[in-house]
Image (spheres, grey):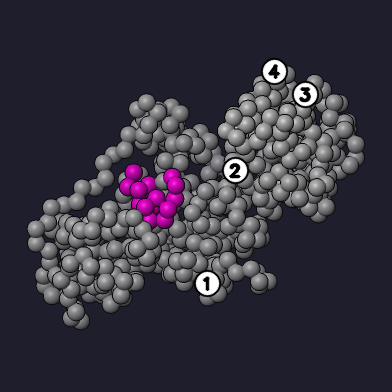
Amino acid sequence: MTLAFNQVAIIGAGAMGRGIAQIAAQSGSQVWFFDTQTEAAQLARDAVFQVWETLMSKGRFDADTLTAYKSRIHMATTLQDLRSCELVIEAIVERLDTKKNLFIELENLLPETTVLVTNTSSLSVTAIAAALKRPAQFAGYHFFNPVPLMKVVEVIAGLKTSREVCERLTHYATQMGHAPVQAGDTPGFIVNHAGRGYGTEALRLVSEGVTDFATTDRILKDQVGFKLGPFELFDLTALDVSHPVMESIYNQYFQEPRYRPSVMTSQRLAGGVLGKKVGEGFYSYADGKAVLPPDHAVPNVKEFPPVWVSPRATRRIELLKLLKDLGATLETGASPSPQALTLVAPLGFDVTTVAVVERLDPARTVGIDMLFEDAATQRRVLATNPATRIDMRDAAHALFAKDGKAVSVVRDSGGFVTQRVVAHIVNIAADMCQQRVCTPKDLDLAVTLGLGYPLGPLALGDKLGPANILEVLFNLQTVYGDPRYRPSPWLRRRGAIGLSLLHTED
Ligand code: NAI
């Protein structure tokens, strides 16, 4: 195998530099560490050696391989020591002026053929390259932390980056065992842009009082399969990192409403309630573990009213079968009897609007989120409206909990919890395709590997039905009158044919 780059320099021997050095050396390259703090480079080398020792003791490779890997790590004391390097990967402090100056210096010291790349996660590749004499030789190469485990790299072409340089970097990523994706030089590139939907929409619905943060986390994990709820994620990342990213992407896109951050996190940031690292975030922490508020208890209901299901309910046949399996007495009349618990299952609309439009008694009307197939979820979510009687709410809660599945009851807002968050994620992804940030295929690949979502946003949209996602968005827009929910033209066009299809001009 011919390596795309035999001699590789890593500048900045922090968390990222170490991880990149490890996989570069494992691929067969000779790796040179440089850091302005000499001890940082030595510590980095020791840390990488330690990782390899551990992997060897676990039987991942033998002693000869360990020796070979170690022999490929070298220390540079000056930038001149890097003259033989064909690729220089910068992973220093995230400051535009510092990065620009470093690359100007490197360009003057190193041969013309050297490829220079930045691991920046938030700065413009084009802006860093602006003062360079050879911007064609410069690109973004964005890895994720921890590098050896997060197997995706964004290859970012600045305005003047040559196609050959991107192709060579792409090839080298696969030689390091990573999946390369091509990203336009746009704010957040792919992963940090696509990730905007999850947290911001969850913040919105909690700040509107739809439900609390712990219930939101439970719902999104149990209904969609996210590994971490958005508030667990905020606590882990810490708000001093994630709130500025939210603001920065929102402002870099000139206040695009889809990325609008929340006053909730700016206030918490100001108050120092940052997350797990300070022992207090959305959750409080005891001995490093989150203290979970208890899940909603199932009410004790002795006698259940008969149940009538709206003819316009989403997945109506499935819902009727579920109710039968749960032992409910079903009404089949054109309208509910005066005793009936009345069930609606809207997409995007709030329960109140549906009750009014369908001329149902709001006091007996409860909504259920049927966007996902019931069998595919671990939790059912119901919504009351302001007029729903407590006995009707409790009857619905107890009925849907009869088979032991978890149930959450949220306030009426339109779109429950999952519909809002999922539709927002899919819409942002669709708009990224519209804006040509990347291809649909790279988008889903980058998000599953970079964010650990159970499915890429476009595949998720296809699974749930693009027409259903569109309906949620159209109706949310009606309920809220907020351009935040306007469907991307790409989503509208693809609505009929599928989002992750590859063979069209889109
Ligand atoms: P870090 O703070 O762990 O390490 C940075 C290292 O760079 C330090 O050892 C420091 O001494 C050295 N350094 C600073 N200025 C230097 C200069 N002018 N010349 C040479 N060395 C210098 O930082 P970390 O987390 O490794 O991040 C580095 C870069 O990677 C940043 O641009 C960051 O945005 C980007 N990044 C970070 C991710 C993360 O999760 N930590 C993820 C993806 C990208």
Q: Quadrant of residue 480?
A: bottom left
Tag 2 residue: 150
Amino acid marked by disc 2: Met
Tag 4 residue: 39
The answer to whether mark 2 is within 8 Å of ligand 1 is no
Amino acid marked by disc 1: Gly
Mark found first going from the N terminus, 2 or 3: 3
Mark found first going from the N terminus, 3 or 1: 3
Front tag of 3 and 1: 3
Residue found at the very far left of the displayed protein: 302
Callout 4 environment at 10 Å: few (<14), some (14 to 19), or many (20+)?
few
Front tag of 4 and 1: 4
Compared with residue 411, is residue 34 higher up or lower down, i.e. above or below?
A: above
The label on residue 75 is 3
Mark found first going from the N terminus, 4 or 2: 4
- Evaluate if marks 3 and 4 touch, with contact meaning CB atoms under 8 Å apart: no
Amino acid marked by disc 4: Glu
The answer to whether mark 3 is within 8 Å of ligand 1 is no
- Evaluate if marks 3 and 1 touch, with contact meaning CB atoms under 8 Å apart: no
Residue range in magenta is 214-228
Callout 1 environment at 10 Å: few (<14), some (14 to 19), or many (20+)?
some
Mark found first going from the N terminus, 1 or 2: 2
x then y, percent, for residue 287: 37, 26
Front tag of 4 and 2: 2
Tag 1 residue: 495
Q: Secondary structure at mark 2?
A: loop
- Evaluate if marks 4 and 2 touch, with contact meaning CB atoms under 8 Å apart: no
Most common SS among magenta residues: helix
Q: Secondary structure at mark 1?
A: loop
Amino acid marked by disc 3: Met
In the rendered structure, the answer to whether residue 139 lies left or right of residue 196 reads: right
